[in-house]
Amino acid sequence: MKDKATLTITSLLSVVLFAFHWVDEVSRGMEAGTLSALGGVVILVVWLSGTLVLGDRRSGYVITLIGGILGLGVLILHMTGPGMIAGRIPANSSGAFFWVLTLIALGVISTISAILAARGLWSLRGTISSASSPAR
């Protein structure tokens, strides 16, 4: 199935872009680079596990779907409210282009990943119910 390979690629790209974006924020002092930031590492581990280890299972699709939605959420949070792009990094500062580029790319690719994961879940709905029905 072509969607499965595309889902794996988009999910992996989302993880890498999320990591780049997070590292950029830590290096600028926008996020704490302390032990409390290990929650982000846990998110990345679960997201990668859902993509690489559980990819063909319902749980893998669910994890990838949630990861895709959260990746889009990062873009939405930075575009609205106190986390606005203009309020966080001055447009003429070094690295602002990379920060915004990873943010937008993360939102777009994560959305594609979420759509493909939803399609994968939808395609599983008939196989699970027919396998659990009693034989006649």
Image (cartoon, helix red, strand yellow):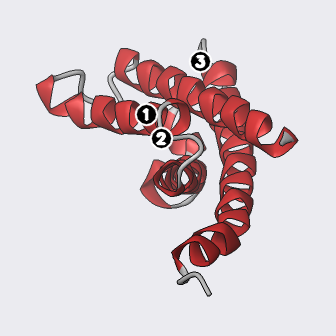
- Dot 3 or dot 2: first in sequence order is 2
Residue 90 visible to the viewer: no
Is 81 placed above or below 48 here?
below
**122 sits to left or right of 2:** left
In the picture, measured across the screen, residue 12 lies left or right of residue 28, that is: right
Disc 1 marks which amino acid? Ser
Q: Residues within 10 Å of mark 2 (few under 14, many from 20)?
A: many
Q: Quadrant of the N terminus?
A: top right
* Residue indicated by mark 1: 49
Q: Residues within 10 Å of mark 1 (few under 14, many from 20)?
A: some
Q: Nearer the viewer, mark 3 or mark 2?
A: 2
For the residue labelled by badge 3, is the local secondary structure a helix, a strand or a loop?
loop
Residue 1 is left or right of residue 8, and the answer is right
The location of residue 123, given as percent across then percent down, is 73, 64
- From the viewer's perspective, tell me whether residue 102 is left or right of residue 6: left
Q: Position of residue 64 (x, y in %)?
A: 55, 48
- Dot 3: few (<14), some (14–19), or many (≥20) neighbours within 10 Å? few
Residue beneath disc 3 = 93
Q: Quadrant of the C terminus?
A: bottom right
Callout 1 secondary element = helix
Please state the horizontal and vertical placement of residue 57, each as a whole percent of the image: 53, 50
The residue that mark 2 highlights is 50
